[in-house]
Image (cartoon, helix red, strand yellow):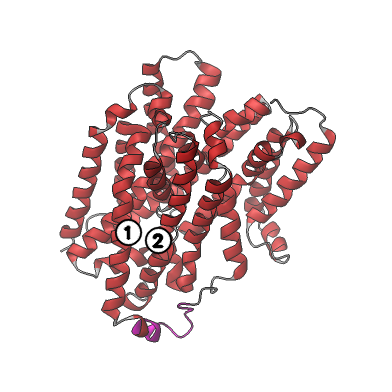
Amino acid sequence: MNWIPFSIVCFYITLLYVITWATRRLSRGGMIAYLLAGRKLPFWVVAPLLTGLAVGGASTIGVAERAYSSGISAGWYNAAWAAGAFLVGFIAARRYRNMEVATLPELFERHYSKAGRIIGVIGQLLLQIVITAVQYIAGGAILSALLPDIVSFQAGMLITAVVFVGITLIGGFWAAGLTNIINVVLIYVGVILGAIIAVKKIGGFGELVAKLPSQHPGFNLGAVGGPLILAWFVVMCTMIFSVQSVVQISFAARDSFSARKGFILGGLIILPVGFLSAVIGLAATVLHPGIVPTEALPRTVLSLGPFIAGLVLAGLWAADVSTASALLVGSATLVVGDLVKRFFAPDLKEKDERKISRITVFILSILTYLLAVLVSGTGIIKTLLLGLALTTPYTLVTLMTLFWPRVCRRGHAAWTLIMGMTALALWLLFPQIPSFFKGLDLPHPIYLCWIVSLVTFFLVAIFDKRKIKS
C-alpha cells in the first residue's frame, strides 16, 4: 500500500518539473535574470516564495519531532518565523528593494570595505549550507517512512537532493517562485488533512489529551519553556533581516510595494503551519509510541490511509522542495555575484553568467548533501537554530546601515562579522562556555552573539573615526 502515496508524491514531483520547464524562458539572461528573476516578482509570488522558504523540513517535520515530546508549544517556532516576516515587511522590505543590490555582502562593500564583503560571503555561505542540509534530512525522513523496506534514510536524502537540484538548475528563481504557489497550497492541504484525520482516528481532541502519557505537556503552550520560546523569536527576528535567501526575495521584487506587501502576506500564511504540524506530532505520541522523533510526522501520516497519506506527504515534500530551491539560488548568487564577478571575471557575458550560476548550484548541492550526512543524527530544529545564530552580526550591521548610518564606521562590517562568528565558534567548540551562560539564563548562542556583536560595534564606533561611504 505504500506504493500509492509514493506514486502521488512522484506525480507531484513530475508536475513541478513540468512547470519549471514551461517557465524556464522567464529566467533567460544573465545572473540577474536567472538568480533574481530579473527583479520582476509581483507580491503574489513574493509571498509564497517567502512562505516556501520558511516552511521547510524544520517547520513541519522538525516541529512535529519537537512536539512528540514537548507538545503544542513546538508551534511557536513558526510563529517566530511569522513575526520576523512582519518586521521586515513593515520596516525594511521597501528599503531593501530600493537599494538595487543583489547580495548583502555587496551592500557591505558599497558602504564599508572589501574585507567586509569577503567575510560576509564566507559567513553567509556557511549559514545557507547548514540550512539546506536540514532539508535533505527532512526529505530523507519522508522517503524512508514511505518505503521503509526499499529506501533507507540515507538513500532518501540522496533522492531528495537530486530533485531539489534539478528544479533549481532548470528554472532559477522564477521557477522557485512559481512552483511555490503550488507548494504552499499543497503544504496547507497536507498538514490540515493530516492534523484533522490523525486526531479523528484517536477519537477527537478529548481522547488525544486523555491518552497522552502522564508526563507529556500536551496542549500547554509554554511547555518548551519561556527562555527557549524567546530564543526562537530572537533568532528568527534576527536572521530574517540578513539571510541571503530571505532578503534576496525583496531584492527580486517588482517594486518596493510588492516587496512590503509580499512579506506581510507571507507572514500571515506562515503563522498557522507550525501549530498544525505540532498537532500531528502530538497524535504520533499516542499512535506510535517509542519511535524515532524525526519520524513522528511521516509515520503518523502513513497510518491515515494510502491516498490521504500521499497527499499529506506530497505537502511535506513540497515544503522541502520550496525551501531548498530558494536556498540554493541564494547561495549561488553569493558565489557568482560576490566572488566570481567581483574578483575573477567582472566582464562575464550573460551566457557565461548563467552557465557559471548553474555550475555553482551543482557544486553547492554536493557540499550540502555531504553536510546532511554528517549532521543527520542531530535534531532538525536544534541544528537549524545553531546555524541561524550566525546571522546576528549581519543583522546588526545591516540595520545600522539602513536606519542609523551616521554612527557607522568603515571598520564595522569586518570587525562585527569576525567577532560574531568567533563567539558562535567558541560556544560550539568549548562546552564550558554554554554551561556558564546557561547559569546566566542565556540558553542559546544567539544571546552571546548579540552581546559580542553589540560590544564590538560600540568599540569600533569609538576608535574608528572613518565614516562609511554614502
Image spot of residue 467 (x, y percent): 77, 28
Q: Residue furthest front?
A: 257
Image spot of residue 225 (x, y percent): 58, 71
Q: Is residue 384 visible?
A: yes
Image spot of residue 156 (x, y percent): 30, 51
Which range is magenta? 207-219
Residue at 79% x, 27% y: name it.
Answer: 466
Q: Name the quarter where the C terminus is drawn.
A: top right
Give left or right: position of 117 versus 27: right
Q: Secondary structure at mark 2?
A: helix
Vertical position of residue 200 compared to residue 153: above or below: below
In front here: 435 or 78? Answer: 78
In front here: 89 or 325? Answer: 89
Give left or right: position of 172 versus 371: left
Is the residue under label 1 in contact with that under label 2 (CB below 8 Å)? Answer: yes
Residue at 32% x, 37% y: name it.
Answer: 175
| First along the sequence among labels 2 and 1 | 1
* Residue matched to label 2: 273
Dominant secondary structure of the magenta stretch? loop
Q: Is residue 378 visible?
A: no
Vertical position of residue 25 compared to residue 416: above or below: above
Q: Secondary structure at mark 1?
A: helix
- Crowding at dot 2, Cα within 10 Å, few <14 / some 14-19 / many 20+, comes out as many
Vertical position of residue 347 compared to residue 168: above or below: above
Asked if residue 212 is among those painted magenta in the image, a careful observer would answer yes
- Crowding at dot 1, Cα within 10 Å, few <14 / some 14-19 / many 20+, comes out as many
Give left or right: position of 64 versus 197: right
Image spot of residue 387 (x, y percent): 55, 49
Q: Name the quarter where the N terminus is drawn.
A: bottom left
Asked if residue 392 is among those painted magenta in the image, a careful observer would answer no
* Residue matched to label 1: 188
